[in-house]
Structures are given as C-alpha cells and as structure tokens.
Image (tube, helix red, strand yellow):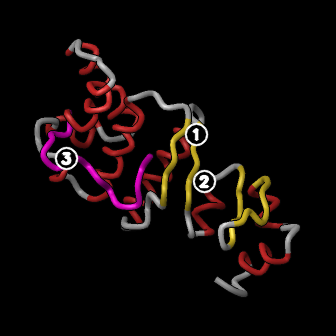
Amino acid sequence: MVFQRPNPFPTMSVFDNVAAGLRLNGVRDHKIVAAKVEENLKKAFLLEEIGDRLNESGASLSGGQQQRLCIARALAVEPEVILMDEPCSALDPVATAKIEQLIMALKQEYTLIVVTHNMQQAARISDLTGFLYLGKLIEFGATDRIFSNPKNELTERYISGKFG
C-alpha cells in the first residue's frame, strides 16, 4: 500500500527503506537485496535522481521523491496488487506528473487500485473507474464510458460538478 502522505522510514537510509520488506521476508543475501533495491528504484524512476544518495535518510528526499521511494519499497516485495490512497494529494504539480507517469508505466505490469478525488487525474491514469458514494459502489466501468456517458444519475451529477 502507498499512503496519501509519503511515509519513508525516517531512521533508515534510502537503500534500507527499499530493502526493509525483503529483509522482513527473509532475504539475507546482500547481492540479491542490492539488486532488488536497484531494480525497484529504477522502476520508480528514482535511481537516476538519487543514485548517489542511497545511504542518506529517506526523509531527506523531496516529497515527490519520498512518495516514489515508498512506491519502490512496495514494489520490492513483488505484490500482486498495489493500493495507492490519494498518492498525489500532498504533492506539487511537477511531482504529481512524475507519479502519474510512474503509474502509467506500472499498470503494464501490476494491478493498481488508485483512490483519488481528483476526477481529472482519474480520467488520465485509469482504465476502469468505480464511483463510490457514502460507502456504496454506485457505478463501475471503463473510464472513458464513465466520464462520457455515465449510466447513473448520481455519477453524472458528480462528474458534471453539480455536487461534490
């Protein structure tokens, strides 16, 4: 899971943040851990930016870099599904664009569930959309159809800005 606000382990280095899940799952071989850390920092579009800072605290990175570090940490344990809860809500537009680019790349390899209140973001990054209201699933389907021709009046009212 990737949370709304970046949550790197503050007392751990960048390297150790990504390695944490591997180590908790019993991976002890340093070569394997190092290879997985590098692989997942690359997948998170982070290695080129901070490759010379792997021994620094994860908390020393910018907010967008911290969020991508948390994504790399999630990827390292080879999940089947990644849940992202408002992964860009605490980020500026530049960092948001990087996270969205990352999501577009990751969805080719992983099942991603992204919770967002940003309808424009949902339209940009998702293949399928579910509209939930007061804890109930109101409508689910292809993103293009949901945004262009919703079947439910409540969905249409939300998308058109009549409430929410």
- What kind of element bears circle 1? loop
Question: Magenta residues, as a range?
Answer: 1-15
Q: Is residue 57 above or below residue 110?
A: below
Q: Is residue 141 magenta?
A: no
Q: Are marks 3 and 1 in contact (CB under 8 Å)?
A: no
The alpha-carbon separation of the residues under discs 3 and 1 comes to 25 Å
Q: Which residue is mark 3?
A: 58
In this rendering, the label closer to the viewer, 3 or 2: 3
Marks 3 and 1, the one that precedes in the sequence: 3
Q: Which mark is residue 125?
A: 2
The alpha-carbon separation of the residues under discs 3 and 2 comes to 27 Å
Say which quarter of the image contains residue 42: top left
Q: Main secondary structure of the magenta part?
A: loop
Q: Is residue 19 above or below residue 65?
A: above
User: Where does residue 67 sit, x and y in percent of width and height?
Assistant: 34, 52
Residue type for callout 3: Gly
At a point 60% along the width and 38% down the height, the residue shown is 111
Q: Which residue is mark 1?
A: 107
Closer to us: 49 or 68: 68
Q: Which mark is residue 145?
A: none
Q: Is residue 47 above or below residue 88?
A: above
At a point 60% along the width and 34% down the height, the residue shown is 108
The alpha-carbon separation of the residues under discs 1 and 2 comes to 9 Å
Q: Are marks 1 and 2 in contact (CB under 8 Å)?
A: yes
